[in-house]
Image (cartoon, helix red, strand yellow):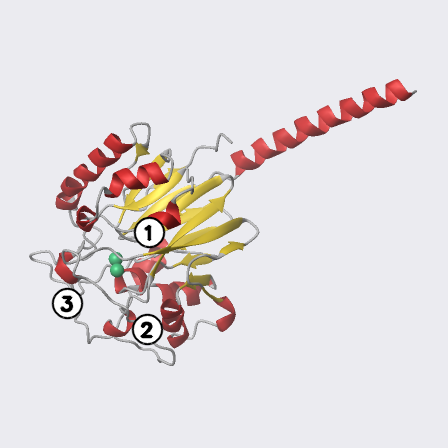
Amino acid sequence: MVKSGFVRFVFMVFVLGTLAAQDQQGAEKSHPVVLKYLGTAGWEITDGTTSILIDPYLSRINGPAPPGGGSGHSLAGDTRRVYGWGDVASPDVAAIDSHIQRADCILVTHTHYDHILDVPHIALKTGAIVIGTESTENVMRAYGVPEGRLITVRGGEDYEFGSFSLKVIPSIHSPLDHKHYFSSAIAPAGMKAPLTLEQIHPEGGTLAYLIRFHGHQILAFGGMNYIEREIVGLEPDVALIGAGASRKEIYDYSGRLMRDLRYPALVLPTHWDNFLAPYGASQQPALDALQSFLQEIAAASPKTKVIVPKYFEAIPLETPAK
Ligand SMILES: [Zn+2]
Ligand SMILES: [Zn+2]
């Protein structure tokens, strides 16, 4: 009696264990995580149910160049309207609506127009929550994004959202203009839309995000810098790494990143394209410049796969081994 009870117990543990394992495999298979590059520092990460956007910027206006060139310069012969700092920040609603149908959560790394210009429209249209600095949230407030959908962070938070969790990583801005870029400005509270480009461009501090989603850990940077002590010990399998030219101002940028992150399986370069050029324009000069980044990663982490993303092309992640 005791023996058969024990056998039955072992059998049940075995069956339940097998079922749980199959369930988990089934769950992973039915929810492959897919990334899409939106250009600039913009990404969509989705499992088909939950959609997370990072710095979604689809307007790609012919706007002011960042200090020292950054990763944007106007194309010769561009006949589109030229925007100055004093012009009203007008998103290209048609471009946004043709590519973004839904979003549950929008992560913003910092309040510069190539990261935030489209966020109010996307937030209002989709009902997504917007996670970002006080500066970012003040811009959202100016456009009437409801307070209940704003989650203000400063870096250090680690939040559970049910289908994913999110660690907010304190970070720093790209060292534009040969390290002379510096801004402690934040977009103030109390502004009312419409805002000018200048009003949506005070950096407000910079963040990075670690997204845990279906067994993946996806680390997303919005530019070409990091605080080393804040990333040591993270072990993302996917890293979206700023690959614009200003990274060359930083000591051993790719080497330290790869070692600190324990050699991620997949690296996706971000913020490497010329965001002042429309989607249809050639990015060949930016692609040529990107080659040195690919070499840096290959040298620092030979086993890491690097995919140079094409706009809006689905990048499905493999099921995590762990
Ligand atoms: Zn910036
Ligand atoms: Zn930027």
State the mark number for residue 101: none
Which kind of residue does numbered mark 3 sit on?
Val
| Tag in front: 2 or 1 | 1
**Residue 282 rendering spot, x and y as whole percentages:** 15, 46
Answer few, some or many: residues within 10 Å of disc 3's Cα (few below 14, many 20 plus, some between 14 and 19): few
Label 2 with label 1: CB-CB less than 8 Å: no
Q: Label 3 belongs to which residue? A: 82
Q: Is mark 1 within 8 Å of ligand 1?
A: no
Q: State how many labels appear.
A: 3
Q: Secondary structure at mark 2?
A: loop
Which kind of residue does numbered mark 2 sit on?
Ala
**Any part of residue 47 in sight:** no
Left/right placement of residue 293 relative to residue 141 reads: left
Which residue does the image show at 17% across and 69% down from the upper left? 83
Which residue does the image show at 77% across and 23% down from the upper left? 10
State the mark number for residue 227: 1
Q: Earlier in the sequence, mark 2 or mark 1?
A: 2
Which kind of residue does numbered mark 1 sit on?
Ile
Q: Earlier in the sequence, mark 3 or mark 2?
A: 3
Q: Earlier in the sequence, mark 1 or mark 3?
A: 3
Q: Secondary structure at mark 1?
A: loop
Q: Is mark 2 within 8 Å of ligand 1?
A: no
| Tag in front: 3 or 2 | 2
Q: Label 2 belongs to which residue? A: 187
